[in-house]
Amino acid sequence: MKDGLLTARQKEVLRHRRQGLTQQQIADIIGTSKANVCTIEKSALENVRRARETLQFMFTLDARFLCEIPAGADLLAVPERVFREASSRGVKVRYDTIGLINRLRESLPEHLQARFVKADIQVYLNDDGEVYFE
Amino acid sequence: MKDGLLTARQKEVLRHRRQGLTQQQIADIIGTSKANVCTIEKSALENVRRARETLQFMFTLDARFLCEIPAGADLLAVPERVFREASSRGVKVRYDTIGLINRLRESLPEHLQARFVKADIQVYLNDDGEVYFE
DNA sequence: GGAAACTTAAACAATTCTATTTAACCACCC
DNA sequence: GGGTGGTTAAATAGAATTGTTTAAGTTTCC
């Protein structure tokens, strides 16, 4: 019955960090090297990242495949396509054009280049109009 | 560079489960025993629980308990309540009604069903107006 | 009562994670 | 150049997690 993902050591470092201490100062307090503090902090943040991604996955369980945006598509064509597909399924997307593009930029920054889609994107939609990109 | 907390096996089970399959059916599909499916599902959900607790920790590094939303509440009643409690503490929430609901949907997708709250929700608030749901 | 769905416990091998050390490295700033 | 703050790589021992099986328990529904 463990509580979270973070070990006591990792929480300790994150707490001290939040207080504004340097890695060296923390190293002195908890009795180890600054290199070790760096490593502990890094893996702690990695754990936080994984926690976020895990909850994101849980969300996609509720979502169903909507459509695929092919590589090479114009970025502005994405919302159009999504709105059309969604309304054909009787669902109202909860974002406007700008909102959708922002959401896409946040979800898959590496799939985009300027105004174009670099790699295929799968779009998932919720009954509530929430959208997820993969 | 692992993605989330869940293994492929665990995701597989959760997906099939969400589709309404029984553990025995899943066991047949993925080629193992139903007891094993049970174990995998259990540890998957345990991982989700830990993911949530981890993010809560990150937030509570500087947030305080605000209020509890009881199961059965209308989703639209949540922002109302949060705004009232927050202003009674002299803090301005950094989200509007829609923003708050989106945030809630992202934080606890499985606590919600359509427009209703399925399970009790704890609300935490930051001095900066940031909000966290548990 | 009996069948189906589900949970639990114990045990095990394989894998992964964690904390550590040491030694080297980058980027500033004075 | 030297100091401070931060990162990285390689190696290692110990701890934790994962998927599995087997066997014995529930709970639930007809």
Image (tube, coloured by chain):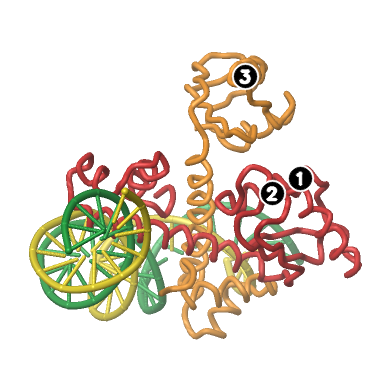
Chain colours: A orange, B red, C green, D yellow
Q: Camera-side residue: B35 or A67? A: B35
A88 up-or-down from C24: above or below = above
As drawn, A133 above or below A2: above
Which chain is indicated by disc 3? Answer: A
Q: Point out residue B17 in the picture as x, y percentages from the top left corner.
A: 37, 45
SS for callout 2: helix
Q: Tell me the subunit letter for badge 1.
A: B
Residue beneath disc 3: A78
Question: In this figure, which residue is indicated by the disc labeled 1?
Answer: B99
Q: Above or below — where is B59 with respect to A103?
A: below
Residue at x 66%, y 69% (from the top left corner) = B60
Front label number (3 vs 2):
2
Res B134 quadrant in image: bottom right
Residue in front for this viewpoint, A25 or A17: A17
At 58% from the left and 20% from the top, the residue drawn is A89
Q: Are marks 3 and 2 on the same chain?
A: no
Name the residue rendered at 44%, 50% in the picture: B4
The dot on residue B103 is 2
